[in-house]
Amino acid sequence: MRKKRRLVWHLFPSYLLITIFSLVAVTWYATEALQRFYLNQTQQDLQARAHLLEKQIISLLSPLDAEVVDAICKELGQLSATRITVILPDGAVIGDSRDTPRFMDNHANREEVVAALGGGIGKSMRYSNTLQQRMMYVAVPLMKADRVVVVVRTSVSVSSLDEAMNSIRLKIALGVLVIALLAAGVSFYISRRISQPIERIREGAQHFSSGNLAHRLPAVGVEEMAGLAEALNRMAVQLDDRLKTVVRQRNELEAVLSSMLEGVAAVDQNELIIRMNQAAGRMFDCDPSDATGRHIQEVIRNLALQRFVLGALSSGKAVEDDFIVYRGGERVLNVRCSPLFDASNRQIGTLLVISDVTQLRHLENVRSDFVANVSHEIKTPLTAIKGFVETLQQGSVDRREEQERFLDIVLKHVNRLHAILEDLLSLSRIEQENDQNEIQLENGSIKKVVQTAVQVCQPKAAEKNIEVRLDCPAEIATRIDATLLEQALVNLIDNAINYSEQGSTVQVRADRKDSEVIIDITDQGPGIHSRHLPRLFERFYRIDKARSRKLGGTGLGLAIVKHIVQAHGGHVSVDSTLGKGSTFTIHLPA
Ligand code: ADP
């Protein structure tokens, strides 16, 4: 690109050129006029002198007295410092104030003589070889009966005029030079005065464009410039205000978006991401600031979800669906797409609101599973009871021992139903009391509670010849509901005994670690496969249903433990190795 010149270098040379051009033009015109005037005067003077000679010369023509004519020419020529030449119509010179006519050329072809012979007054200006000077000639015809009888030519040197004119021109040129220098100074000063405020406005505009809107332009100089500076200052103030508002609004929006738990992503009609928040970035496993402007295929790596968004874009309708994605395990995302409109109500894309509903869907599943499980758990003993009671009713079982066996079976199922209902009731009671904050926690000794629980389980342990070891410092105490905690411990110790082989050991250990009280129940049982661990504390979740039932389990024991511990503000965990045994741990806040 051509380098741009500064305004002063546009104005200054233009001013200077105009000034010099005007000066030269005026000077040239003046000197030309002066020269013309001077030459005109000289010409008229020469003409007058020629006319003065007329009468004397005519009287000497008939008869022709060339010598006298020549003598007159010489005399008058000397007196008037004029060269006088008398020429006959054939061009022969008969008198001349400087030379001898005899030796002079024929003058018929001289420009001024030709004109005079034609009856007019001849004028000419040329360099004379005879005199080695520039001369002005005027030739006047003397007429007799409408016939030119002789031509009187007067001439003077105009070299002195040329010299005078040259000296005038030189003086004028010097004057012009001085004036030009002055004009240069003045035009530079004026140019600077015009360009400086513009320069300042340009600098100010540069400040504004580089984001420094606090800069202010001085409103000085001519009215237009001061007005322009003020207008620019006002514009900067307004721009600053608007920018601050936009930045504030953007920050607010950013804060709202980034603190949302739901993922939010805006996609334009060209399937490019306009914007997404942090939560959406986490869900799609990408950097939200990096995602802007990228195609959804690059960002959303789930094919079904991509198709869903494309469908929402083309239909322009609000749609909703669940999608399963894998991000450190299976997650269920609920995605709602609603059309995105601009200020003029034109659809420009779609807005995705994504919620991680893994937990919710899991709870829903657990709930529906629970209903199915409860029904199933109750139905099995009820069917058995119904069958046996009907058989007994029909009276087809005569033998007393048989009847007693049947009744024993019925009783066993009734007990089972009772156990299930007991466990369900205690579960819902714990849940309810916990929800309503009705569980009263008091500072109590852990050792006491653990000892009681072990005692409760002792008979069963003795039956299987299992040793239950207890290791619990007496001083450990925390806020507990002793009855509930005992129930939880009984459930865990009971399970440990139930699922352990004859003659093994169950270790119950309590300790204080950091800000927790920890109670471990470790058995040497079969252990639990890791795939069961995440669901182990769900209601009715059992690894081996038949075995659990045989042992009188309801499948609710661990769920009750979990709820009791949660009611204490703690949590329960399990660590197990197949074939080696399991450790269930209750963590209570100390
Ligand atoms: P249940 O009444 O069937 O024992 P729980 O809720 O107490 O129900 O336990 C759920 C399941 O966890 C049991 O069916 C069993 O398969 C498994 N389980 C519980 N405790 C142990 C343990 N100590 N060792 C091995 N498996 C266990």
Image (cartoon, rainbow, N blue to C red):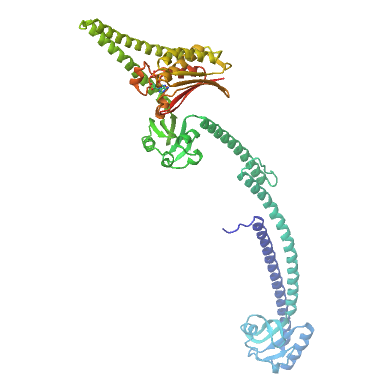
Q: Residue furthest right?
A: 79
Name the image quarter holding residue 174. bottom right
Q: Quadrant of residue 298?
A: top left
Q: Name the side, left or right, on which 32 lies relative to 583.
A: right
Ligand 1, image quadrant it occupies: top left
Which quadrant would the C terminus be assigned to in this image? top right
Please state which of residues 9 and 424 is positioned toward the viewer in this rendering: 424
Residue 108 at least partly seen: yes
From the viewer's side, name the closer residue of 89 and 142.
Answer: 89
Tell me if 93 is positioned left or right of 262 in this view: right
Give the number of callouts. Answer: 0
- Image location (x, y in percent) of residue 251: 56, 34
Please say if 121 is above or below 505: below
Q: In the image, is residue 390 above or below residue 175?
A: above
Residue at image x 72%, y 55%?
Answer: 189
Q: Quadrant of residue 219?
A: top right
Residue 158, x across and y down, in percent = 72, 79
* Residue 52 position in % (x across, y down): 73, 81
Q: Position of residue 134 (x, y in %)?
A: 70, 82
Given the current orientation, which residue lies at the most extreme bottom position? 102
Residue 179's place in the image compared with 218, above or below, is: below
Q: Residue at x 74, y 77 (%)?
A: 163
Q: Is residue 346 visible?
A: no
Quadrant where the N terminus lies? Answer: bottom right
